[in-house]
Amino acid sequence: MRFRYIANACFEITLSTGEVILTDPWFEGPCQQTWWNFPPAPEPLKVEVWARRPDLIYISHLHHDHLHPRTLEPFARDIPVMIGKMNTPNLRNALAALGFTDIRQIPFETEAPLGDRGVKAVLFKDFHGNTRGDDSQVEYDLDTSLYLTDADGTRLFCAVDNTILPADAERIARQYGPPDIAQVPYASASLFPMAMADYDDAAKLKATKALRARTSANFRDVFLALGAKRVIPAGGEYVLGGPAAGLSRFLPQPLESELRATLDAVEQADALAKLYPGDVLDSATLAVTPDPRAPYRGFDDALRAAYALTLAGRAPSFTELALPADTPFDWNRALKKCAANFAARRARMGLALPMDIYLDARATDGEPAFLFRLALDSDAGEMVDGDADSARASLSYALDARLLFCLITGLVSWNAMEASALMGIRRRPDVYTHDLHRSMVHFTLLS
């Protein structure tokens, strides 16, 4: 098995049978409004991948850094696409809307043959609600992971972005065998601390350092529990562009040097296989063949942040949206409808609102446009004057009204956009409430 890194969570897996599986293609252009691959894939590498027809494409989940229409555009629509059998049709519908005709849904934790040449796959759904291991009340399958057994017995585990913890890794190794190669996530696509409007730079840097230390330790412990021979950090390789470019100083992904130091502390530094675009890891020798075209090899924080600033002039796509002036959008009516949908969905989930939620919409020039409140003691939302009630617990989103329009009409997902830092987040008290953030995906006109 040859494991070739392209970008982010995109790998080109060449099996012993000669078959090729392409995972989570995103290597061309921006996604999530202001996300950009880092390190970027060189143009010749992109051309090579596009020119080679894979036998199968695996899409782990719906977010555009895994399901990217612009990157997928050159691929033939009859290529089989493998996804997990989720409890919503969202991922399947998105692929069908792009024109893919052979979408294969695999039941979770059920070993399924891939063709008739001895290759087998097992898919896993979300392990936990977040990287702290909290369970979620939000019944919405999102992330998936792939365990692949080649015809020659070589085993590969791709956790992708999934919130895997050491106990999950230990169970996988016990049930399916320790993988030869493991791809383990080492950071979440989190709004924290980048979007925290109440934090100054010093507070953000302190939070970033603590977050990196925690995720590096989890990366190490998951690897040890899996018992893999080589471990690849991947999933979450990006920088921010556009108006959020400067916030790339506070990215949560640890550097290669930080991950290596964490593994070195348990005498496992040689197991780390930090791959750059085009690099190949061979399962037979466990050696890495570096691609000389890969840019930014061994980058540090300063180099990554400097690259992000070259993207500062890129405008998020929502800024191209012009709300009609002659027929003003009825925000009050629309947001009250969203609030009713949100309340009905929370009731079905048994999720009580733990605090007030404020939507602090801003005009194009950044000036306040309106303030909408969802009160914890009411299912109905309302427009309010002034500021948030400082005596009550609250979560406040400050965001461009055009972006809010995209969110409530389903053009953009709340959960995907949080991480892009295009919103200013304030919470009182300063405590993360995972289900509340995740449930915002249902605050739409379509929920």
Image: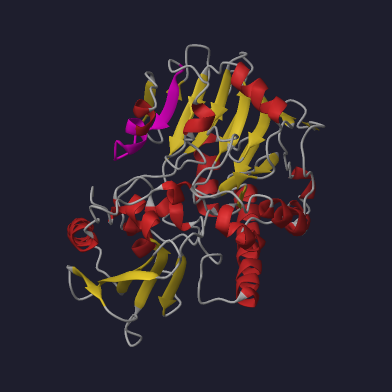
Determine the residue located farthest toward the top in the rendered image.
116
Residue plotted at (60% across, 45% down): 36
x and y percentages locating residue 234 in the rendered image: 62, 44
Q: Quadrant of residue 180?
A: top right
**Left or right of 349 in this view: 437:** right
Q: Position of residue 441 (x, y in %)?
A: 33, 53
Report which quarter residue 351 is drawn in.
bottom left
How far across and how far down the image is residue 80, in percent? 44, 19
Q: Position of residue 365 (x, y in %)?
A: 45, 65
Camera-side residue of 403 and 396: 403
Part of the protein shown in magenta: 79-93
| 143 vs 266, nearest the viewer | 143
Q: Is residue 158 magenta?
A: no
Q: Nearer the viewer, residue 2 or 247?
A: 247
Q: Is residue 387 left or right of residue 5?
A: left
Image quarter in which the N terminus is found: top right
**Magenta residue check for 86:** yes
Task: Look at the image and tell me whether residue 180 can be seen.
Answer: no
Q: Is residue 412 left or right of residue 209?
A: left
What residue is at 49 percent from the left and 59 percent from the top?
422
Task: Look at the image and tell me whether residue 210 can be seen.
Answer: yes
